[in-house]
Image: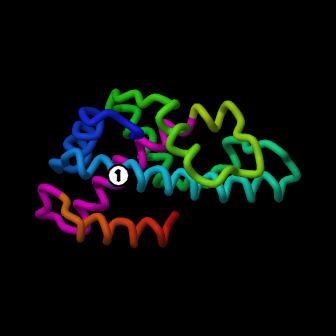
Amino acid sequence: MIMAVSEFERLFREAASLDVDKNDLKRLSNFLGKKIYDLLVVAERNAKYNGRDVIFEPDVPVTKGLQETVREFESMDVALKLEPVLDHLAGLPPLDLEVSEDVRKLLPKLAGALVVATARVLKALDPGLKNPQTEHWERLETVFDQLI
């Protein structure tokens, strides 16, 4: 799991007034792992394009909206650990390039921001939503797959 149940529940509550359970956490962890990996795949392409053999923070395709969500996540005073994010990524196909220390430090912040964005998108897709169900998660994944 990328984060503890209590952190996950708190972020969803603060970001979008949503109630989630342990099943949602497993689904979210898998989703976050895939989206962070997708960002790193594009970052790797950017680094290669620029003739580098290491991925640096400017290579990671962080949009203006995601940057703002990172800042909002940081203001929520929840510090995620790097190790669970790396452990989750270890189960995915390896990248060709090494990830720099600045990118490693960014990964927990990206994970937290993606949790906040996930909660807000779920709420935007269904404003009356209180507890996401399978259909909500499927719609969310469709939206994020188009964007990230």
Which quarter of the figure is the N terminus placed in? top left
Residue 35 at what x, y percent from top left?
50, 56
Q: Is residue 123 left or right of residue 89?
A: left
Between 24 and 61, the one lying in front of the other is: 24
Q: Is residue 92 left or right of residue 97?
A: left
The kind of secondary structure the magenta stretch mainly shows is helix
For label 1, the crowd category at 10 Å Cα-Cα, with few meaning under 14, some 14 to 19 and many 20 or more, is many
Instruction: Judge whether residue 21 can be spotted in this image.
Output: yes
Between 44 and 68, the one lying in front of the other is: 44
The segment highlighted magenta reads 106-131
| Residue 42 vertical placement versus 9 (above, below) | below
For label 1, the residue is 28
Residue 142 at what x, y percent from top left?
39, 72
Between 22 and 111, the one lying in front of the other is: 22
Residue 132 at what x, y percent from top left?
19, 59
Which residue shows up at 52% across the image and 63% down it? 148
Mark 1 lies on a secondary structure that is: helix
Residue 57 at what x, y percent from top left?
67, 42
Q: Residue 4's image quarter?
A: top left
Which residue shows up at 85% across the image and 47% down it? 52
Q: Is residue 5 left or right of residue 58?
A: left
| Residue type (three-letter) at the residue carrying disc 1 | Leu
Q: Is residue 1 left or right of residue 120?
A: right
* Colour approach in the figure: rainbow
* Residue positioned most to the front: 91
Q: How many marks?
A: 1
Instruction: Judge whether residue 17 can be spotted in this image.
Output: no
* Residue positioned most to the right: 51
Which residue shows up at 70% across the image and 40% down it? 99
Which residue shows up at 78% across the image and 51% down it? 47
Residue 114 counted in the magenta span: yes
